[in-house]
Image (cartoon, rainbow, N blue to C red):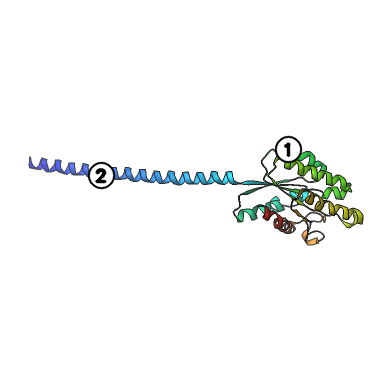
Amino acid sequence: MFRITITIGKRQAQMKFLKSILFLIVVLTAACNSDNNKLTGNKNKKEGADTVMKKTILFFGNSLTAGYGLEDSEDAFPAVIQRKIDSLQLPYKVINAGLSGETTSGGVNRINWLLKQQIDIFVLELGANDGLRGIPVTETKKNLQSILDTVKSRYPNAKRILLGMEVPPNMGGKYVAEFRGIFREVAEKNNIPFVPFMLEGVAGNVKLNLRDGIHPTAEGYRIVAENVWEVLKEEL
């Protein structure tokens, strides 16, 4: 009887010990799950907030925006600006809507389709192909205004920026001067910031342009990005 009592006592003690261990495991597991849920929930909330907060910058232009001739499209100036924005942790997403060969009249026809998405900042880079084709400056000016009006009508609160261009001297002195002037005139009429000449420091430099002498190299685009950034950063 004595031995049986001792055995039963040991078993009871063991059972109590096991129950204590199991209870501790359950408590710790519940605590861990709770912490994980909190962390996951906070992470999801942060990611959701980041998505909601991100605004859109639309670069609307021709081959100069598209990055024609580059081996990597990430070397085009809108992509360079996106990396700068990311490095500064600013809540903006860049959309490159450049189309090679685009004229201002083509832009008038294309803009409505692109405005189906929310636009917070609109950067207009068109006119170079008009100039190279000798299209009357009055036509180019009218089309630029039409594009800006369409954007304002669709998104009244969107900020608009105009990138200025110039044409080669062989187009004739009168045409060159008039063409240069339309960008400032349009910018002043709409009271919007503009870059006088987006290819400043790049145009005419053999080392910074492709063989066609028109489109920048990756190195040239980094300079273009800085030219644009100097104006764009004030609007962010």
* Residue 113 tag number: 1
The amino acid marked with disc number 1 is Trp
Location of residue 193 in the rendering, given as x and y in whole percent from the top left corner:
74, 53
Query: How crowded is the residue under tag 2: few (<14 C-alpha within 10 Å), some, or many (20+)?
Result: few
Q: Residue at x 73, y 58 (%)?
A: 227
Residue wearing tag 2: 20
Q: Work out whether residue 211 or residue 214 is closer to the camera in this orientation and state it.
A: 214
Q: Position of residue 21 (x, y in %)?
A: 27, 45
Give the alpha-carbon distance from disc 2 to disc 1, as whole Å: 68 Å
Q: Is residue 108 left or right of residue 222?
A: right
SS assignment at label 1 = helix
Q: Report crowding for label 1: few under 14, some 14 to 19, many 20 or more residues within 10 A (C-alpha).
A: few
Q: Report the quarter where the N terminus lies.
A: top left
Mark closer to the observer (2, 1): 1
Q: Residue at x 36, y 43 (%)?
A: 30
Q: Position of residue 65 (x, y in %)?
A: 75, 50
Instruction: Specify the quadrant of the image occupied by residue 2.
Output: top left
Is residue 16 left or right of 42 when viewed as pictured?
left
Q: Earlier in the sequence, mark 2 or mark 1?
A: 2
Asked if residue 90 is positioned above or below residue 4 in the image, the reply reads below
Q: Is residue 42 left or right of residue 118?
A: left
Extreme residue in the left direction? 1
How far across and down, in percent of the image, does residue 39 sit?
Answer: 45, 47
Residues at circles 2 and 1 in contact by the CB criterion of under 8 Å: no
Could one spot residue 136 in this view of the protein?
Answer: yes
